[in-house]
Image (spheres, rainbow, N blue to C red):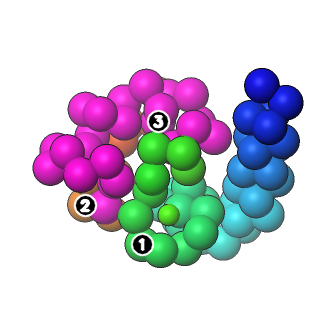
Amino acid sequence: MKNLAIILSTVMMLASINAYAGSDFDKYDIDGNGVISATEAKVDAALAEQFNELDTNADGELSKEEFANFSGE
Ligand SMILES: [Ca+2]
Ligand SMILES: [Ca+2]
């Protein structure tokens, strides 16, 4: 559990740095590899909740196109 807390706080920190990077997609794509992983989605409770629904091709990552369907609520 301690490691998880460290990982999550690191993710949150990186997310806040990237919050100024531009679009919401870029904000969530913390490592900048062009897709949002399930781990990256965890910085936003609503996104994490909708992740499987948004991942229409079920590859475990959200492309920009898949993320476009995210309502943000
Ligand atoms: Ca990524
Ligand atoms: Ca996908």
Query: Observer-nearest residue: 70 or 59?
Result: 59
Measured from the top left, where is residue 19 in percent x and y?
70, 60
Of all residues, the one furthest to the left in this rendering is 57
Examine the rendering and report whether any part of residue 69 can be seen. Answer: no
Please indicate whether residue 24 sits to the left or right of residue 5 in the image.
left
Name the residue type under label 1.
Gly
**Dots 3, 1 in contact, CB < 8 A:** no
Measured from the top left, where is residue 9 in percent x and y?
82, 43
The magenta stretch is: 41-63
Residue 43 belongs to the span the image colors magenta: yes
| Mark earlier in primary sequence (3, 2) | 3
Mark 1 within 8 Å of ligand 1, using the beta carbon: yes
Q: Residues within 10 Å of mark 1 (few under 14, many from 20)?
A: some
The residue tagged 1 is 34
Measured from the top left, where is residue 10 in percent x and y?
80, 51
Name the residue type under label 2.
Glu
Name the residue type under label 3.
Leu
The residue tagged 2 is 65
Q: Which residue is painted at 29% across and 33% down in the image? A: 52
Please indicate whether residue 59 sits to the left or right of residue 12 in the image.
left
Measured from the top left, where is residue 29 in percent x and y?
53, 62
As drawn, 70 above or below 24: above
**Kind of element beneath mark 1:** loop
Q: Residues within 10 Å of mark 3 (few under 14, many from 20)?
A: many
Query: Observer-nearest residue: 14 or 6?
Result: 6
The residue tagged 3 is 47
Q: Which residue is painted at 35% across and 41% down in the image? A: 70
Mark 2 within 8 Å of ligand 2, using the beta carbon: no
Q: Quadrant of residue 54?
A: top left
Q: Which residue is painted at 57% across and 37% down in the image? A: 42
Q: CA distance from mark 3 to mark 2?
A: 14 Å
